[in-house]
Image (cartoon, rainbow, N blue to C red):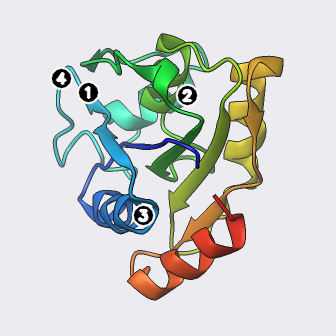
Amino acid sequence: MSKVLVAFFSATGITANIADELAKAENADRFEIKAEVPYTKEDLDYTVKDARSNLEMADESCRPAMVGHVDNMSDYDVVFVGFPIWWGREPSIIDTFLEAHDLSGKKIVPFCTSGTTGVEKAVEHIKGIVGDAATVSEGKRLGSDGTKEEVKLWTELLGF
């Protein structure tokens, strides 16, 4: 049986709720990806041109500092990586997380929370970051109302 980690960034709590359901369904450990400087409501206001989240996403090289680290990453076979969709892909802090850990030989399973935008662009971006070191699955978009049943069905289809 694979040892599973659910790592996630949640700006408003929606992704955290889905991550909790996923961790229960997979009997997985969880790691919350937190920004060293927490995001405020103003930072997340995508309608403001110079809001922090917009500035970060406009700069492909941006890697916001994060708090903590998964010290025992080598223990995991499967790493679910969850996030809200920002600018059609994963927030830059996810890139920080991916680059901060040795993911060699891991299966990475991205999942996003979004009302309409799919996970495909994020999956391609994540593949570019991890390269050949890890296998990245096609991932899954879950709406903000993602249910326990939806998460369970998805994980059953994955077969971990």
- Residue drawn at the location 51% of the way across and 78% of the way down: 152
N-term-proximal mark, 3 vs 1: 3
Q: Amino acid at mark 1?
A: Ala
Q: Residue furthest front?
A: 1
| Residue at image mark 4 | 37
The answer to whether the residue labelled 4 contacts the one labelled 3, judged by CB atoms less than 8 Å apart, is: no
Vertical relation: 107 (above or below) 69: below
- Helix or strand or loop: what does disc 1 sit on? strand
The residue nearer to you, when weighing 16 against 90, is: 16
Q: Residue 132, image x and y in percent?
A: 83, 20
> Which residue is labeled 1 in the image?
35
Indicate which disc, 2 or 3, sits on the residue closer to the N terminus.
Answer: 3
Q: Give the Cα distance between marks 4 and 1.
A: 5 Å
Q: Which residue is mark 3?
A: 22
Along the polypeptide, which appears first: circle 4 or circle 3? 3
Instruction: Identify the amino acid type marked 4.
Output: Val
Nearer to us of marks 1 and 2 is 1
Structural distance between the alpha carbons of marks 1 and 2 = 18 Å
Q: Earlier in the sequence, mark 1 or mark 2?
A: 1
Q: Residues within 10 Å of mark 4 (few under 14, many from 20)?
A: few
Quarter of the figure with residue 130: top right
Q: CA distance from mark 4 to mark 3?
A: 26 Å
